[in-house]
Amino acid sequence: MRNREFLALSGTAFARAQAYSTIAIALALYADAFGTTSTVEGLFGTAFAVVQLLIVLPLGRYVDTHNAKRVLLAGLALNVGVFVAYSFVTDATGVILVRVLQGMGASVLWVGGSTVVGEVAPDAERGQWLGTYNQVGAFSSLAGDVVGGVALELYGFTFTYAILSGVTLLAGVLTLLYLRDNPGGRTDPEAATGLETLGRLLGRAPVRALVVFRVGLSFGKMVVVIFLPIYARTVFDMPAFLIGAVLAGGKLTKALTQGLVGGYTDRVGNKQYFIVVGALGYALGTAIVPLAPYGDILFPTLEVGGVAVVPAAFVLFVAYGVCGVADSVRLPASMALFVEEGEQFDAVGGSLSLRSVAWKVGQVVGPVTVGAVWDATSALVAFGTAAGLIVLATLAFLALYSAEPRATPDPAAGD
């Protein structure tokens, strides 16, 4: 954190993650204000993801071959424009259109920031730089839930978006002043993400297993990310700050346990089983969400600062907390396996690109599909569907992953 370039890059991660978390709460308020259907609410998630699915690979290649500093500055400027646009939306259609722009801006900052951190970090410290960079994003996401929730509740949309714009502009100033011009140059984009490389990777059963799993998990997980705050607002009329507290609880459990579990994963090995346990845990947390109406069986209604904290809030807090611990179990193992498979073909970049694309597929399809299911049935069926698909994806992963032995290095990979 004493390195000025890292400080600038961390600023982009902070601005991106804080905006994502704060706007997730704002979407619940928009859904309540506009009286949207669950299908339309699903489009809030799909609109954000579909543009990312389309641009993530070409954007990665563009960052590798152009001035990444200018790309980051453009992404920060776009995000400020997004906040201004959110201030003027008057209906659900406007929210969906701005979500497309937000997805584009978030992709630019995520792909550009992660790439540049890896490029400018000293070779012997790259893991530490990337890990710390991700931790900054995690802290910012948590801050977005708490601070963003309070700001939305007390001051409304315009003031909250002004705060996000100020943070983003500050990140832009740090980037302009401290980040070297045209960082990068270590990666061969064709070797990392070329079609031939991706084809070789997909020829591996373990890689196909990981990709299938990512699609199914993202389908279910994004349902929770999009609909849990909307569910809390539209069904239980929870204030924005309480929604933020519920979301912050899950992210706190993830932040506290991920490092410990990651180290344990390295010592124990058999990373595929950590993925299975984590995924099933996430399915459990997802299945708990629609039990919120029955929270009064176990929890009382409390008064906090003159605001009633309904029993449903405790159920949702527990559900998202379970999801946070489950992510801690799954995530380090999942990333490690993608990297290990990519290393066998000297194509870690290609492997991680497949990981990202697979996630975007489920992220596009999941929210709108489950939203339609919710409209036709109930919250119980909708979240049950998401949990069931996670379980099916986990079983498919386990079967496919064991169908082929671990890869051996490809002699042609370095050609």
Image (cartoon, rainbow, N blue to C red):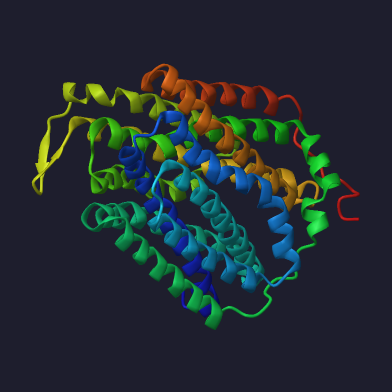
Residue furthest front as drawn:
90
Instruction: Answer with the quarter of the image where residue 73 lies.
Output: bottom right
Placement of the C terminus among the 4 image quadrants: bottom right
Q: Nearer the viewer, residue 297 or 252?
A: 297
Rendered view: 60 above or below 73: above
Q: Is residue 314 left or right of residue 397?
A: left
**Residue at the spot x=62%, y=80% of the render?**
180
Rendered view: 351 above or below 162: above
- Residue 270 appears in the rendering: no
Looking at the picture, how far across and down is residue 92, in whole percent?
43, 41
**Residue at the spot x=72%, y=43% of the render?**
341
**Residue at the spot x=8%, y=46% of the render?**
306
Looking at the picture, how far across and down is residue 383, in whole percent?
42, 24
Rendered view: 136 above or below 312: below
Looking at the picture, how far across and down is residue 98, in whole percent?
49, 51
Q: Is residue 344 left or right of residue 151?
A: right
